[in-house]
Image (spheres, coloured by chain):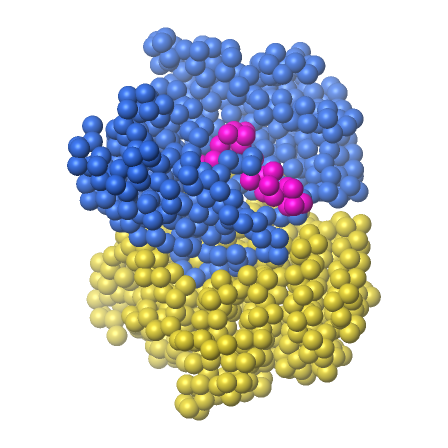
Chain colours: A yellow, B blue
Amino acid sequence: MLSTQISEKLISIVGKENFDDSQVGRLVYSYDASPQYQSMPDAVVSPRNTEEVSKILRFCNKNKVPIVPRGSGTNLCAGTTPTEGGIVLLFKHMNQILEIDEDNLTVTVQPGTITIDLIKAVEAKGLFYPPDPSSMSISTIGGNLNENSGGLRGLKYGVTRDYVLAIEAVLPNGDIIRTGGKLAKDVAGYDLTRLFVGSEGTLGIITEATLKLIPMPETKKTLLALYQNLDAAARSVSKIISNKIIPATLEFLDQPTLEAVEDFAKIGLPTNVKAVLLIEQDGPPEVVERDMEMIAAICREEDAESVEIAKDEKTAELLSAARRSALSALARLKPTTILEDATVPRSEIAKMVNAIEKIAEKYDVKICTFGHAGDGNLHPTCPTDIRDQEEMERVEKAFEEIFAVAIDLGGTITGEHGVGLVKAPYLEWKLGPEGIAAMHSIKHAFDPNNIMNPGKMFAKESRKRVVVAR
Amino acid sequence: MLSTQISEKLISIVGKENFDDSQVGRLVYSYDASPQYQSMPDAVVSPRNTEEVSKILRFCNKNKVPIVPRGSGTNLCAGTTPTEGGIVLLFKHMNQILEIDEDNLTVTVQPGTITIDLIKAVEAKGLFYPPDPSSMSISTIGGNLNENSGGLRGLKYGVTRDYVLAIEAVLPNGDIIRTGGKLAKDVAGYDLTRLFVGSEGTLGIITEATLKLIPMPETKKTLLALYQNLDAAARSVSKIISNKIIPATLEFLDQPTLEAVEDFAKIGLPTNVKAVLLIEQDGPPEVVERDMEMIAAICREEDAESVEIAKDEKTAELLSAARRSALSALARLKPTTILEDATVPRSEIAKMVNAIEKIAEKYDVKICTFGHAGDGNLHPTCPTDIRDQEEMERVEKAFEEIFAVAIDLGGTITGEHGVGLVKAPYLEWKLGPEGIAAMHSIKHAFDPNNIMNPGKMFAKESRKRVVVAR
């Protein structure tokens, strides 16, 4: 509970209508898309502009009130759960697209802007903002920036980080800083822009961002390749890339995922195959045509059972939408869905998928795997039930082992979902104590009172590495 | 001078043959490509591996001995001058290309690798490493990483930062950290990779890097457009981009630069025009063909006096080499050459070039301007003589005013050369005291004893902003 004095001060900054400490108001923001981490905030505060954010941070810093910035709460790492209480900061008043600059190919936005709104607004002008997290129809740009969100188009186009040219951010001491500009090149000092991107709200609050746009690709084609053999699918992925074709998306779905997706989307996907690759290429028509032919040939050479290029845009759109619905589809299977994003070098995908299968067997849990095969960014997903404590322990152990295998294969514990609370205990496996110490020194330099999203990224305790039996 | 004890300890780490405190040995590393900042180091030390780097840093940190890491010293910001003494660290033993991974499209290198050697090695395998600073035939990758080097291909392909997937670095306390991996996506913690890229050796020593490669473009064409009117050239640049064509390079040269370049390269460039655009496009043949036609049409529409597509590869190569020789060519005009890289949003190039002309007139100095017009990254260059103190003062004032104009136009004091000593006093103009404080807190967190390249980036005193009269 906040003291009356603290509540009153916050109200004096944002106005009564933008401060909510009612039971129901707080309940709404006590959880995000990650199961198991519900926790009540003391209040929910909605600043109207950067100056108010600055006042809030300065005040909370003095009074050591935790601040959890939150977009739509679609993250899967418990990145926005207020586990140490304090205030949840909403950006519903700071949700404008401020400018689309067609000369400099930039868009300037406030953090509360919904990702899809931004994408549609720039596409209306023939421009393209590639980062496309699966949650983009409800996620905010502020959330995308804080998590450095990826998406399906990461392979060819990169992730959120690669499109941020400038930010305005408020530091815990209330300072407002501005980094970068509408500039293709800027090396004036440390790269604070990218330090903030992916910092999960632990360093300050991003209050504005200028993002890079590129010309909209002229055309797009989609191909579906079906396999009865996992390794064949993985080999196709490697061979496409080593043939120097970089598709816009190169998605993988295993049989259980496929079944769930078809049951959800009902578009006639085959469910009796071991694996599917969904491949899109975009660009000038001649190039797309040529690439798709080569991709189809490679898939066939690598024993695809069937290779089909979507006959029209509508079919392509259905396939793409079906893939994007994977989490929703899998979430229908059981009360709880745990979706991870262990990521490995592209060349190690087959090993990783096989290891996931074995680990699932070993711990007797169901794990469906899909993801961005071209990026080596897999989403092993476990439909389970948090009320079944015994099973949950097995699930936890299975994921621990999955993280360990990913790291042993030269990978990482999280490709695009962030660390948050969920993966904080495993971060040291990836970075070593020296890496954690280096990151912690940055955290301490910016936020000595640990008010910014406390508990996230830095775990109170690291887990011991499991011994991986393969 | 280092004490005998310190010298002996350093010798015990790297071996006698890798420690040099002779007068002549130190003299060689007392300056870099930036005039006016010569200063003697106390010794020159060449570690053989990461462990030795770690031992050196730990020892120097305890004993507060400054360390200046140095590649080939081609930087233009006095980034590698040992102005506070201490040791210069060379990477002549750590200069290997460790691996080219064709499945994952990566190359792993040691910092002493010469940029062009890396580029040629990957091109031999049909792969492409785009960052191409003009100094690439002698610069090292370590230097490129520390300065976040740009180049001619930045417009379409980005800068060094955009190609770094992983680094190994040694911190001042001797800790060895490893960031990232052969991973298209990795969000495990803060982006230390990009914090180190462009940190100018002020945070630690990069001892290894894994860089992203892309498929080699199939073909390339080059076009030369001549203008009698500066604004027409600038309008062409804007119009090309707003027509959604992103050329591989889009270079600008003014008349005095053109004259110097032709005098140097003798390839028959016209010298009686006000401005030249040198435009390259690469990619699939159909696309290059189409883009070049559109670009040529736009240049003609915008009053280019002549538009010519290079008839063959050899001619194209000559044009490109001539452009890359601009600094060498201008350096022949006078004993001292001061080359800057004020950068503005692309839409502001005409204003910036006009402002530079007026400023040169006002202070009665010669300034030749060329640069990456597509990036808004201009290189106003002043042929002068450091022995003429009175003129040098006018030169300094002129550049001060150029920086001020760049910032007023939404630009930056350095697009790709770095801050170093040269631009440290102006950094606050770009970042404000809050931005400087934030960066300084990072510096202090990593390097509390200020042993890493001291004096660079953070100035002892900031200059006052000049009042810009336009």
Q: Is residue B124 above or below residue B223?
A: below
> Quick check: is B296 in the magenta stretch?
no
Q: Nearer the viewer, residue B105 or A413?
A: B105
Which residues fall within the magenta stretch?
B118-144
In the picture, residue A334 is in which quadrant?
bottom right
In the picture, residue A233 is in which quadrant?
bottom right
Q: Is residue B29 above or below residue A6?
A: above
Left or right: residue B293 compared with residue B417:
right
Left or right: residue A417 compared with residue A326:
left
Residue at 31% over, 47% down: B54
Q: Is residue B94 above or below residue A35?
A: above
Left or right: residue B233 compared with residue A339:
right
The quadrant in which the N terminus of chain A is found is: bottom left
- Measured from the top left, where is residue A351 in percent x and y? 57, 70
Q: Nearer the viewer, residue B340 or A122?
A: B340
Query: Looking at the image, which residue sits at the far front?
Result: B16
The number of numbered badges drawn on the structure is 0
Q: Is residue A30 above or below residue B428?
A: below
Question: Could one spot residue A148 in this view of the protein?
Answer: no
Query: Looking at the image, which residue sits at the far right?
Result: A311
- Measured from the top left, where is residue B299 in percent x and y? 72, 28
> Quick check: is B121 in the magenta stretch?
yes
- Measured from the top left, where is residue A361 in percent x and y? 54, 85
